[in-house]
Image (tube, rainbow, N blue to C red):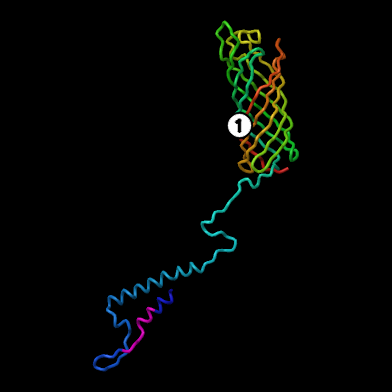
Amino acid sequence: MRLSCITFAVALFHRTFAIYHSGVMLFVNSAARMPIRVFASVLIAAAMAAVFASPMQAQTSQTTPQGQPANGVYIASDPLANVKYDNKWDVSVGMAYGHIHAGPNLREGANLGGLDLSGSYWLTKHWAVEGSGRGYLGTSGVAPNSVNLAGLFVSQYMFLAGPEYLGPHNKHAAIMLHALVGGVYGDFNTDLRNNKPGPTGPAAFYDNQMTYGGAFGGHIDLNRSPNWVFRITPDALMTGYDGTSLYPHTQWNFGISVGAEYKFKKKR
């Protein structure tokens, strides 16, 4: 296109024959036969066409490097492509729920909320040692009494450890099983307002005590990246209250926590 514009501009000045009425034949330019205004307009248009034709020609001559996608092409990426289950350590934290009975003869249970902090050290692809610390706080109903006690504060703290097993898994999710045992501390007398503690008191709560306990269940992990995991941990919670009172009683209750896990990428 640039060459055509230049050719057109040159043609304007090409010498041609002109025969006048007097019979005289002279060489004149084609541009000379045009009015000055028309000639100037044509010359400017030809120059502008030549200028704009050069970048367009250069653009069409450029080639896309081999293997490079053109502009506007969608490139699919998989954020879970590097989920390998080869980490050596992981930690998790979640909001926890646990149900307990604050006394051996209380029919009304207590729904407690708290925190679940756990960590695992992986020995092999499928086996790990897990430790877990859990705290639950809330209020509990009491036995019928004559001192107007109701809705008293109670708390429970669990310190557990045991084996963990990696079950069915893929890059999207995994199911892990664990059997954790250890100690449990129950605080039942903080809010008794100077009334007699223990199962024979007006609230009929347990005595404050340290006893055995356990958590039997596992994790449901939903991978969000190679390092970050959304974790759900349902468990059957066992407590061994009440070895220091007149009413021994082993409880089984439901507990669950929901939170996040982080996998350290130091490979085994």
Q: Position of residue 256 (x, y in %)?
A: 63, 28
Q: Which residue is mark 1?
A: 258
Q: Secondary structure at mark 1?
A: strand
Res 251 quadrant in image: top right
Position of residue 140 relative to residue 229, above or below, is above
Q: How many marks?
A: 1
Picture residue at 40% right of the left edge, 77% below the top: 6
Front residue of this view, candidates 64 and 220: 220
- Which range of residues does the magenta coloring cover? 8-17
Position of residue 71 relative to residue 167, above or below, is below
Q: Position of residue 34 (x, y in %)?
A: 29, 80
Picture residue at 68% right of the left edge, 44% below the top: 84
Picture residue at 55% right of the left edge, 64% below the top: 64
Q: Looking at this rendering, what residue extends furthest in the bottom direction?
A: 23
| Mark 1 surroundings within 10 Å by alpha-carbon count, few (fewer than 14), some (14 through 19), many (20 or more) | many
Front residue of this view, candidates 203 and 197: 203
Residue 9 among magenta residues:
yes
Position of residue 243 relative to residue 50, above or below, is above
Q: Is residue 133 left or right of residue 150?
A: right
